[in-house]
Amino acid sequence: MGEQAMRILVFSHKAEVREAIINAVGRRPAADLGRVDYTEASGISEVLVEMDAGNVDLAILDGEAQPTGGIGLTRQLKNEIEDCPPIVVSVRRKDDRWLATWSQADAVLVHPLDPLTAAETVADVLRARRVPVVHG
């Protein structure tokens, strides 16, 4: 039963946004998933180091981060990292969902974050990532 915790990277230049995301998703987003550990990043360089090292099972990026937002960063990561981990983008307005789709994000969270929706969204993305690839 010693399953290793999945690692979630949370990026925002604002500590309160990172905290809101972590609190909304929680330490165990679903009963069928193990615990998750969080790594916080306040700058792009931290995100790139973690993603390039392969230390991330899922990333949640703040679409409103400054000076570089998570939407553009998501598109960059999806186009530059082979087998890029899933990325969830958090946005402030429902109308910005289309931008998250353009960025190739795997899912979108809209502020104010609802803990049930946030945990369910992250759990769904993590489950999809865990499905083994069958080569035939």
Image (cartoon, rainbow, N blue to C red):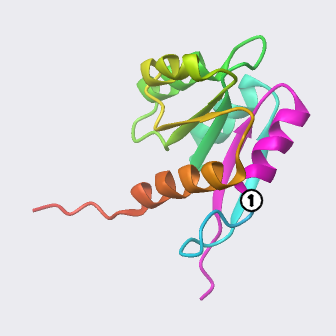
Residue 56 belongs to the span the image colors magenta: no
Q: Is residue 101 visible to the viewer in this orientation of the structure?
A: yes
Residues shaded magenta: 1-26
- Look at the image and tell me in which quarter the C terminus lies: bottom left
Identify the residue shown where x is 64% and y is 62%. 29
User: Residue 76 location in percent, x, y?
Assistant: 51, 20
Task: Check the image and report above or below for 76 versus 49.
Answer: above
Which residue position holds label 1? 26
- Residue at the left extreme of this rendering: 136
Near-viewer residue (88 or 110): 110
Q: In the shown orientation, is residue 116 left or right of residue 95?
A: right
User: Residue 68 location in percent, x, y?
Assistant: 70, 13
- Residue at the bottom extreme of this rendering: 1
Task: Check the image and report above or below for 124 versus 3.
Answer: above
Identify the residue shown where x is 42% and y is 23%. 79
- Residue 13 location, quadrant: top right
**Secondary-structure class at tag 1:** loop
Which residue type carries mark 1?
Answer: Gly
